[in-house]
């Protein structure tokens, strides 16, 4: 029997909550910018600090590694100590680490401070999303808030190189870190005034062994995937990946025995929760591979510089943000499952167009494909996040948010390591039999590595031979893009069918439930309506 309380509409958020959302968007935007802002600053800090090649890679990657590794721990910690409290503590740490990074005197110091920035960032991301869950109990408003949050996240990734370039025109490389300080000051001042405190009412202790198992498990998997994407699959990435998977297995087994697990296995007994996370993971794999290949196409095939490539990629970024902001209205009319499946079909159409477009076609065709992909992927990113957060009971919202964000991190690494590796393998196979006569053996060996290496090998050759080599390399690269786009299109078609089928009964546009009802359904043995 369903009581009147169960069917009462959830309260709507007011002005304070929407102002609070604006406060939460600021650190989200900053965290996304920090993922890419160093791409243009690296040559400047390299000239100043003289890091080795390995140190340069760690300066770039350690931030993302720490964010991915600590998300699960910090999301659950926020449920226990308070999401707002953890958010403000993370803001202080992020601000201090930003100043220390800006004034680093050596590569080792910068690597350490970037690692601290990553740990602090891991406290901010799930805290912002779980606070949105509690500030916006009304389903439609929560979707709109998550759409704005996701648009800030995606926009920050696109804005990172642009802002980095602008700052470097006027200031030294350390200034790219200092822009985070005023944002964190705003959060520290406005957060206590506009953000509510929320925590699990009966939080248990944080299991230290679970933390010890989860951190190296995630770090090992992400590191192995990134290493494979950079240097190909070999013994080292394979062993690291196997080790991470083994630790992950031990982590899951321990969660099943704990009264207060770091990640509640009961969450995965819900079809919408599990299918949602899986769909998000697979969708992110396709998107991350596309971003990598599209950027390489603009710079290495079309010969555009970084700024011009950024201009050509702006339609994709704008289409993605527009799709994110329009998703709540589309879902209100069509329902979650239909909106997600329809978007995936649109993205699959974009990948199909990309697969059929010749490599020497006008770049506008690639932009059209990118716009379709950006628009089509938007419902998946917004609605899956909203469904995952809503399916978890309120006291587990931080843990659910961290799982959703960890899935995105793993999806991004998997996309580059799998589909990116497929593209590289196809390139090497295609160019192996397509090299023009007259290319020296050393240049041919270098050209068979990648398109970028082919461009380097062509620099020291006669004009005619160099042009013929680059034509063969571009054709081989185009073959790789076509195959990866075809694979992504097929994967998204299957994903569209799966989400339309498995998420249809979880579509809350047709089956409205209160947050309390969702929480009870999520608890093993809890009451149901």
Image (cartoon, helix red, strand yellow):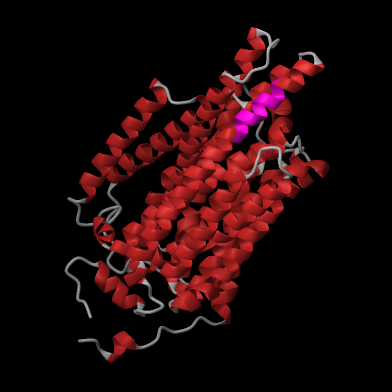
Q: From this viewpoint, is residue 113 visible?
A: no
The x, y position of residue 7, in whole percent, is 32, 87
Q: Position of residue 524 (x, y in %)?
A: 19, 65
Q: Report the side of 233 relative to 60 (left or right).
A: left
Task: Find residue 184 and report its image quarter.
Answer: bottom right
Q: Is residue 138 magenta?
A: no
- Splitting the image into 4 quarters, where does residue 60 fall? top right
Q: How many marks?
A: 0
Q: Against 273, is 369 above or below?
A: above
Q: As displayed, is residue 424 above or below residue 98?
A: above
Q: Nearer the viewer, residue 237 or 121?
A: 237
Q: Give how far across and how far down residue 65 sits, in percent.
A: 48, 39
Q: Nearer the viewer, residue 437 or 52?
A: 437
For residue 221, say whether it is visible.
Answer: yes
Residue, x 45% and y 57% (percent of image)? 126
- Residue in view at x 58 percent, y 26 percent: 55
Furthest residue to the bottom? 4
Q: Quadrant of residue 197?
A: bottom left
Q: Give the residue at x 45% y 40%.
A: 414
Q: Residue at x 23, y 67 (%)?
A: 523
Quarter of the image that includes the N terminus? bottom left
Give 299 or 448, whichever is nearer the viewer: 448
The quadrant in which the C terminus is found is bottom left
- Would you say 13 lies left or right of 446 here? left
Judged by its main secondary structure, the magenta piece is: helix
Q: Which residues are magenta?
A: 469-478
For residue 330, above or below residue 224: below
Please indicate whether residue 106 sits to the left or right of residue 204 in the image: right
């Amino acid at each position: 029997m369903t009581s009147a309380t169960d069917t009462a509409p959830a309260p709507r958020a007011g002005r304070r909550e929407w102002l609070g959302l604006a406060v939460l968007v600021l650190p989200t935007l900053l965290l996304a910018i920090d993922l890419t802002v160093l791409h243009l600053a690296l040559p400047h800090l390299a000239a100043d600090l003289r890091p080795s090649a390995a140190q340069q890679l760690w300066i770039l990657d350690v931030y993302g590694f720490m964010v991915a590794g600590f998300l699960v721990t910090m999301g659950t910690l926020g449920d226990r100590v308070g999401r707002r409290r953890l958010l403000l503590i993370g803001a202080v740490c992020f601000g201090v680490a930003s100043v220390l990074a800006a004034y680093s005197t050596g590569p080792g110091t910068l690597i350490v401070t970037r690692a601290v920035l990553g740990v602090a960032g891991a406290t901010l991301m799930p805290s912002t999303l779980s606070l949105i869950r509690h500030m916006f109990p009304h389903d439609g408003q929560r979707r709109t808030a998550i759409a704005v949050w996701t648009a800030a996240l995606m926009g920050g990734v696109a804005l990172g190189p642009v802002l980095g370039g602008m700052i470097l025109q006027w200031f030294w490389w350390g200034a790219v870190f200092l822009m985070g300080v005023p944002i964190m000051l705003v959060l520290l001042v406005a957060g206590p005034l506009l953000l509510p405190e929320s925590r699990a009412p009966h939080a248990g202790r944080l299991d230290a062994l679970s933390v010890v198992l989860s951190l190296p498990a995630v770090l090992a998997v992400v590191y192995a995937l990134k290493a494979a994407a950079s240097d190909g699959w070999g013994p080292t990435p394979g062993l690291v990946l196997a080790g991470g998977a083994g630790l992950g297995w031990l982590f899951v087994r321990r969660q099943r025995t704990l009264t207060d697990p770091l990640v509640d296995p009961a969450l995965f007994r819900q079809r919408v929760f599990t299918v949602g996370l899986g769909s998000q993971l697979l969708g992110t794999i396709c998107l991350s591979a596309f971003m990598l290949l599209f950027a390489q196409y603009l710079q290495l095939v079309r010969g555009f510089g970084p700024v011009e490539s950024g201009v050509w990629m702006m339609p994709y970024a704008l289409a993605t943000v527009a799709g994110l902001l329009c998703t709540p209205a589309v879902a209100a009319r069509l329902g979650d499952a239909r909106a997600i499946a329809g978007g995936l079909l649109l993205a699959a159409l974009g990948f199909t167009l990309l697969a059929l477009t010749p490599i020497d076609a006008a770049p506008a065709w690639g932009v059209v494909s990118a716009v379709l992909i950006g628009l089509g992927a938007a419902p998946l990113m917004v609605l899956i996040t909203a469904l995952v957060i809503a399916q978890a009971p309120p006291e587990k919202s931080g843990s659910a948010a961290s799982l959703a964000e960890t899935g995105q991190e793993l999806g991004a690494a998997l996309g580059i390591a799998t589909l990116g590796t497929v593209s590289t393998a196809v390139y090497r196979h295609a160019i192996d039999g397509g090299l023009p006569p007259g290319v020296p053996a050393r240049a041919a060996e270098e050209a068979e590595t990648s398109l970028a290496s082919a461009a380097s090998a062509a620099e020291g050759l006669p004009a005619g031979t160099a042009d013929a080599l680059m034509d063969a390399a571009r054709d081989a690269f185009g073959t790789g893009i076509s195959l990866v786009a075809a694979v992504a299109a097929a994967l998204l078609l299957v994903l569209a069918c799966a989400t339309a089928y498995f998420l249809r009964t979880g579509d809350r546009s047709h089956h409205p439930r209160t947050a309390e009802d969702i929480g009870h359904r999520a608890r093993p043995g809890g009451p149901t309506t």
